[in-house]
Image (cartoon, rainbow, N blue to C red):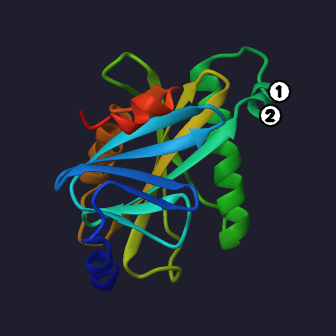
Amino acid sequence: MKKLAYTLLGVLFITSLQAQKLIKCDENTTYWAIADGKTNYVLQLSGKVQTTSKETLIAVDTKALQYLLLDKKPYEALLEEKSDLGLLIAQATRELEFFSGRFKKQLKGQMQKLVLDDKTAALLWWFEMPEGMNKSITQQLFLSVVINDKILGLASVQAKEQKFEDIKDFLAKVMNTLTKVRSKRKLKRICK
């Protein structure tokens, strides 16, 4: 991780690595632009940001941060009554089934509704890492919102030395900065 950090010290403004578009404004402020056609979903990050070899994963200080951008239609089909919270629960349930299959163990997920600063409904959900999978990671946490025809999810892990509330607050803080930018000119001037 330190080697990667030193490599990134020379990056001043825009860094692109596959789907990672980071716009560094100063030492403590970076924007992460997630492209979806002509729209960019932009998140403000505070702290030292580092890229990784995975296109949807970065590190912010000592925390991993990953995004998932999905079409909401497949989840709408699972619901009789359509609501944003219902969609988020359906998506989280499907993801939990996926992780259970991946880890070959039935995971017990937990969910909590959050309301963001702009009154948007969000779903926080998490599960404990199965025993023996990763000694340094205790839980995986996810925070998702519905944006128009998409579901945007942010994910992080809780390491043994970290507190659940700190990771939850980190995800909420980042999600609270979410803005949509449709103009390339506005995206280029985001630091001003």
Q: Position of residue 43 (x, y in %)?
A: 38, 40
Q: Residue 112 sits in which quadrant? A: top left
Pointer 1: what residue? 77
**Can you see residue 40?**
yes
Q: Is residue 185 left or right of residue 39?
A: left
Tag 1 near tag 2, CB within 8 Å: yes
Q: Residue 38 sits in which quadrant? A: top right
Q: Amino acid at mark 1?
A: Ala
For the point 36% across and 64% down, the residue is: 59
Q: Position of residue 54 (x, y in %)?
A: 55, 68
For the point 51% across and 83% down, the residue is: 132
Would you place residue 155 above or below residue 161 in this image?
above
Q: Is residue 40 left or right of residue 48?
A: right
Which disc, if any, is residue 41?
none
Would you place residue 1 above or below residue 10 in this image?
below
Q: Is residue 41 left or right of residue 164?
A: right
Which disc, if any, is residue 74?
2
Does dot 2 land on a helix, a strand or a loop? helix
* Residue count near mark 1 (Cα–Cα under 10 Å), binned few <14, some 14–19, many ≥20: few
For the point 61% across and 34% down, the residue is: 151
Would you place residue 138 above or below residue 91 in this image?
below
Q: Position of residue 49 (x, y in %)?
A: 30, 61
**Can you see residue 141?**
no
Q: Is residue 23 left or right of residue 150?
A: left
Would you place residue 55 above or below residue 145 in this image?
below
In space, the residues marked 1 and 2 are separated at their CA atoms by: 5 Å
Q: Nearer the viewer, residue 112 or 35?
A: 35
Q: Residue furthest front?
A: 185
